[in-house]
Structure formats: C-alpha cells, structure tokens
Image (tube, helix red, strand yellow):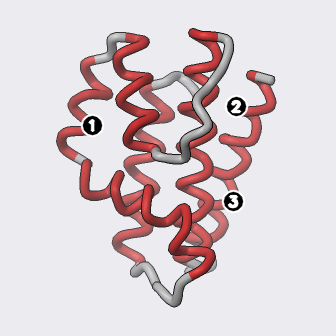
Amino acid sequence: MAEFLKNNALDFLKEAERNLEEKKNNLAMFHLEQSLQLALKYMIYQHTGSFPKTHDVVELLNRVSSLINNSRLIAIIDSEITTLNLLKQAYIASRYFPISYDEKAAQKSYDVVREILHELGLV
C-alpha cells in the first residue's frame, strides 16, 4: 500500500510538470494537490500503518510535521499557508467549477509541493 501511494504521488507530480509546460494550469493544480495529498498519506502510513480519509492537505501536512517532528515543514506551513489553501481548494474547484488558475499561482504551487516532497525525501 505504501509504495502505491508514493508512486502515485510522484506520477501526479510528473503530470503536473507536463501540465505546466502545456499551460494547463487547472490540471496542474489538480495534479499538484493529488501529489501532495498522496505523499502526505504515504508518510502517515509509513509511521502509523494507516492514513486518514481526509483530503485536506493542510491537516495532513500538520499531522506529518508532528509525526516526524520536522521544523522545516512547520516553517513551510507558516510561510506558504496561502498557497497550501489554494491547493486544498483545487481538490474540488479545478474539476467542478469554472475557475482558472494563472500561471504564477500554478508555478508557485508546484514550487511549494516540490519543496515539501523534497523535505520528505521523495524527490
């Protein structure tokens, strides 16, 4: 189960990269949210043997940061809460609502997700 979550997280990140290159920002935001969500669930699963059914990436990130006692993740949450909330919103909005994300927001989201995955040792 754990490797499945990790592999999908990395695959979603690759899709987001392709979406950004193609200027498909809505899809990039969706794939970035999925990448982050699955990476965080992977980390929780590694430490507890299960993961919560929530899709809230901020809640998941807070849980991971406390599980692994990582001050850098706490700093990312504090400094990037706006971007993290945008990603949280993208879980629903990018698929179902007539919302569009600009290139800067999508790129910033990519940078934050990549930084978190790097901090977790996944990229």
Label 1 neighbour load within 10 Å: few <14, some 14-19, many 20+: some
Q: Horizontal placement of 11 versus 110: left or right?
A: right
Residue 89, how many percent across, how many down? 43, 64
Q: Secondary structure at mark 1?
A: helix
Instruction: Determine which quarter of the picture holds residue 87.
Output: bottom left
Residue identifier under label 1: 76
Dot placed on the residue nearer the N-terminal end, 3 or 1? 3
Q: What distance separates the C-alpha of mark 3 from that of mark 1?
A: 23 Å
At a point 25% along the width and 48% down the height, the residue shown is 80
Nearer the observer: mark 3 or 1; the answer is 1
For the question of whether residue 4 can be seen, the reply is yes
In the rendered structure, which amino acid carries the disc numbered 2?
Lys
As drawn, the label of residue 6 is 2
Residue 15's tag is 3
Amino acid type, mark 3: Glu
Alpha carbon of mark 2 to alpha carbon of mark 3: how far? 14 Å
- Could you tell me the amino acid type at mark 1? Ile
Q: Quadrant of residue 5?
A: top right
Image location of residue 20, percent across then percent down: 56, 70
Sort mark 3 into few (<14), some (14-19) or many (20+) by Cα contacts within 10 Å. some
At 51% from the left edge and 74% from the top edge, which residue is drawn? 93
